[in-house]
Amino acid sequence: MKKIIAIIALFFTLTMFALDGKALADKLGIDAGSKVTAQWTRIFKSGRNKAKMGIDKLSSDEQLSLNSYLMDNAADSDAAESAGR
């Protein structure tokens, strides 16, 4: 039983890291505060813009996590990251 619990805990830990929006943004070299929410919305709606930033190579769950992180930390959000860190 302990092995099963350990395996489940490991799976959820790995899933959390895989879906971490900030980690994905850092991996792609994307700064959330460099754009306002409307710009991030347009980027995610455009296949060409997603491809240009490498977002298209992420799984759909990773894209959702990244989108959520970028929208929550966009330049015009309450928790904005400063542009050009």
Image (cartoon, grey):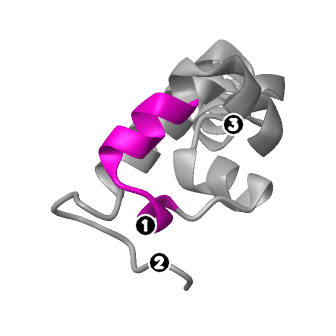
Type of secondary structure dominating the magenta stretch: helix
Q: Amino acid at mark 1?
A: Gly
**Label of residue 83 in the image:** 2
| Residue marked by disc 3 | 18
Q: Residue at x 35, y 57 (%)?
A: 74
Asked if the residues shown at circle 3 and circle 2 are in contact, with their CB atoms under 8 angstroms apart, the answer is: no
Is 72 covered by the magenta stretch?
Answer: no
Residue 76, image x and y in percent?
23, 60
Tell which tag, 3 or 1, sits nearer the viewer.
Answer: 1
**Label of residue 6 in the image:** none
Quarter of the view holding residue 85: bottom right
Element type where label 1 sits in the image:
helix
Is 34 covered by the magenta stretch?
Answer: yes
Q: Residue at x 45, y 41 (%)?
A: 40
Left or right for 48, reference 44: right
Asked if the residues shown at circle 1 and circle 2 are in contact, with their CB atoms under 8 angstroms apart, the answer is: yes
| Residue marked by disc 1 | 33
